[in-house]
Amino acid sequence: MARHTGVELGESFIDPGVNAAHINTVLGPRGSAAETAWTTSLATPSAGYERFVVIMRPGVPVQPFTVFVSKAAPVDDRHGEMIWGPAQAGVAAGVADAVAAGTVAPDEVSDLRLIVAVWVNPKADDAEAVYRNNRLATATALANGAARYPDVDTVLKTRGQIGNPFFTPADGGAPGTETTPEDPK
């Protein structure tokens, strides 16, 4: 019986610097909502937000078939090269790593579809770091999706530690500091 009977969602953020990788994954079997989204994404590109099949090298798409969705429109040629080059190569390697590790069952890859949404900072300046970070972030996101991570307990325990590389609330998002809209009376 196939392990992938439903859609798996994953996320990973590696390295807070300009060469960071922020990956979101959607993995699912043929006939699922993941396949519909995969096909729709590839068939309906939008200006500046590249969508393409990820390749190991020209003529060899990674398995499972993976569509790369850029979360950032290229601001210049260098940024575009970082998206199409090292970020794509990192995603391909990360998917292959997940298959090699058994996170994605090798005997199921032909029946799965994978969407990887990728953010590359326009200020990225180190192609090797972009590659390494996207490779690790992709494999980690797939592992997180397979493990259904995070569970609700982890989410609730993390409420007082809210933050990301772009913003951390002064109170850390500590419980009990929530604000509510004023009564419009």
Image (tube, helix red, strand yellow):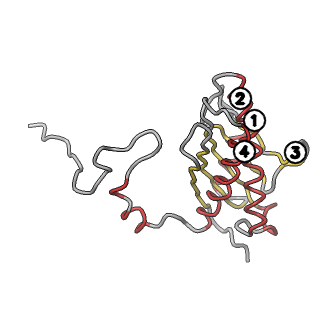
Label 3 – label 1 distance at C-alpha: 12 Å
Q: How many marks?
A: 4
Give the mark nearest the N terminus, 4 or 1.
Answer: 1
- Amino acid at pointer 4: Tyr
**Which residue is painted at 64% across and 33% down in the image?**
124
Image mark for residue 84: 1
Q: Position of residue 180 (x, y in %)?
A: 20, 46
The residue under label 2 is 80
Instruction: Please determine whether, in this image, residue 24 is positioned above or below residue 140.
Output: above
Q: Position of residue 52 (x, y in %)?
A: 75, 39
Closer-to-camera residue (51/133):
133
**Which residue is painted at 84% across and 48% down in the image?**
56
Label 3 – label 4 distance at C-alpha: 14 Å
Question: Within 10 Å of the Cα at label 4, are there few (<14), some (14-19), or many (20+) other Cα atoms?
Answer: many
Residue 44 location, quadrant: top right
Contact, mark 4 vs mark 1 (Cβ under 8 Å): no
Q: Position of residue 83 (x, y in %)?
A: 70, 35
Quarter containing the N terminus: bottom right
The residue under label 4 is 131
Instruction: Please determine whether, in this image, residue 140 is positioned above or below residue 170.
Output: below
Q: Circle 4 sits in a helix, a strand or a loop, which is it?
A: helix
- Amino acid at pointer 1: Trp
Question: Within 10 Å of the Cα at label 2, are there few (<14), some (14-19), or many (20+) other Cα atoms?
Answer: some
Question: Within 10 Å of the Cα at label 1, are there few (<14), some (14-19), or many (20+) other Cα atoms?
Answer: some
Give the mark nearest the N terminus, 3 or 1.
Answer: 3
The residue under label 3 is 57
Give the mark nearest the N terminus, 3 or 4.
Answer: 3
**Dot in front, 4 or 2:** 4
Q: Residue furthest bottom?
A: 1
Q: Circle 2 sits in a helix, a strand or a loop, which is it?
A: helix
Q: Circle 3 sits in a helix, a strand or a loop, which is it?
A: strand
